[in-house]
Image: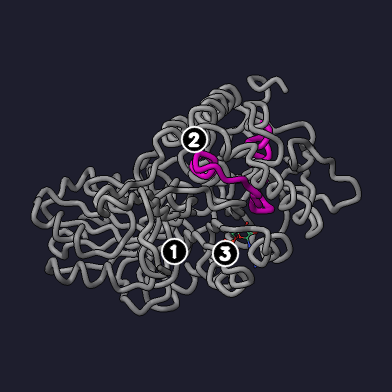
Amino acid sequence: MDQAATRLSLPDAPREFGFFMNGEWVPAGDRDVFERASPGHGVPVTRIPTCTKEDLDAAVAAARRAFDDRRWSGLSGADRAAVLLKAAEGIRARADEIAYWETLENGKPIAQARAEVGGCVGMFEYASGLARSLHGDSFNNLGDGMFGVVTREPIGVVGIITPWNFPFLILCERVPYILAAGCTIVAKPSEFTSATSLILAEILHDAGLPAGVMNVIPGTGPVVGQAMAEHTGIDMLSFTGSTRTGRGLLTAAGSNFKKLGLELGGKNPQIVFADADLEDAADGVAFGIGFNTGQCCVSGSRLIVERAVADEFAAMVAEKFKKVRVGDPLDETTQVGAITTDAQNAAIMGYIRQGKAEGARLIHGGEQLDFGRGQYIAPTLFGDVTGDMSIAREEIFGPVLTVMPFDTVDEAIGIANDTDYGLAASVWTKNIDKALTVTRRVQAGRFWVNTTLSGGPELPIGGFKQSGWGREAGIYGVEEYTQVKSVHIEIGKRTPWVE
Ligand code: ADP
């Protein structure tokens, strides 16, 4: 493909993919093929096989063989690191191609997609170091007759189920860490956005990853996803998606008591104090809900603002919303792209209708934007919101922000914690005492002070409460995919039990 030539225009025909298993591409054959239309343009962009349960069984068998014969876990950390570094190079070399297909399938702005791919290179580079530094523990204090060693072993075959909002990024927040631990992988992307996961499998293969270590099986959630959760050949499942689907996996994973990593929904507070740099805060709050059209589990969707500045601040955010560039995802200057799926578009518009019906005051947006093709929703701001309204309680997963005022630090913390979720939170203040008190007492797995949605390969990702289990990324994200073995080593002659 001439990437430079096609980057900013639509493909002439949808790109055909196979799926990737046991070190090779498998053509669609007589399987159903899912044709994906670009949500920003409504034209078909990819054609991807819909795998079956039998395909999954074959992929799990390949991953199991690759794990059991130690072709990957038996390598030194240094050798695994070399493959991860080569993969990082491979991603860098194909970054424009990855960003292009990500934008076409997902609807996110091309500039954003490129930045995400750049972040993914960093994930692989960082995880390569972890492959070498991962270690256990030792106990040299058990007396002269005993030495204790704690080792970390890869957990085995890992299933990964990813959603459509960050298809490549979310995969790359997991894959290099799982590979650093020595595990093998069967990944199922969302059926709407499988292309870049398949490209990653090819990049890993080209980087020297042994056959069977990384398998990508596109398919639907109820068929392949559900079968993965139930599969007794999978030792751990990392799921990213809705809390509703995640809850269903708890039972399915009971088949073999597989370990579950869950990154689920969020209804994340943005707490703004009157003493904040309000200009910075307004920009950050607009970014926190506008980025990826609010289709992030960590989107800052609840603005909780000190009453003294509440109206002024809401007006500042509305002003930012007015100026933000919504439009064609292939346009280099676009900041907010299309809504990824038809169902999500309908769900967001449904929430906007419900917000109005429940008595919230529409300050900005609230409507579908018509660019002649594709599906777009204006960044939307609701005032006069109360804690019992569905727009204040439920994860909308769209560019919809609610405003609620507070008077005291305790009240701000109370509103922030009044949710079943606990994924992320941000606080904006120049007062260190307020910043630290709020950071300590608001229940969230990720916290931002005077910023939002920043991150990198070092800091772990995951949620409190009904936002999930476990952590991804950082050293934590490698350790999650290991299990711990205690080794007791007797020194010298045994004290006899039977004389
Ligand atoms: P959304 O409704 O926003 O797409 P989901 O949680 O349904 O969020 O989707 C996230 C991922 O979970 C996707 O890859 C999807 O195919 C998958 N999925 C959906 N239903 C199931 C299921 N019953 N079991 C396993 N995975 C599922």
Q: Is residue 214 left or right of residue 461?
A: right
Residue hosting label 1:
468
Taking the view exactly as shown, the residue that stands out farthest to the right is 30
Which quarter is ligand 1 in? bottom right
Q: Secondary structure at mark 2?
A: helix
Going from N to C along the chain, the mark reached first, 2 or 3, is 2
Between 332 and 262, which is closer to the camera in this rendering? 262
Is residue 83 shown left or right of residue 122? right
Residue 32, can we see it? yes
Residue 259 horizontal/vertical position (percent): 52, 62
Residues under labels 2 and 3: Cα distance? 27 Å
Would you call the spot at circle 3 few (<14 residues within 10 Å), some (14-19), or many (20 or more)?
A: many
Tell me which residue sits at (47%, 62%) in the image: 264
Q: Is residue 49 magenta?
A: no
Q: x, y (%) of residue 394?
A: 44, 71
Indicate the quadrant containing the C terminus: top left, top right, bottom left or bottom right: bottom left
- Residue 317 visible in this rendered orientation of the protein: no
Residue at the image position 63 percent from the left and 62 percent from the top: 343
Q: Earlier in the sequence, mark 1 or mark 3?
A: 3
Q: Can you say whether 294 is above or below 123 in the image?
A: below
- Determine which quarter of the picture holds residue 381: bottom left
- Picture coordinates of residue 271, whole percent (x, y): 23, 59
Q: Which mark is residue 258?
A: 3
**Span shown in magenta:** 175-202
Q: Which residue, given by chain and number where applicable, does mark 2 sit on?
A: 120
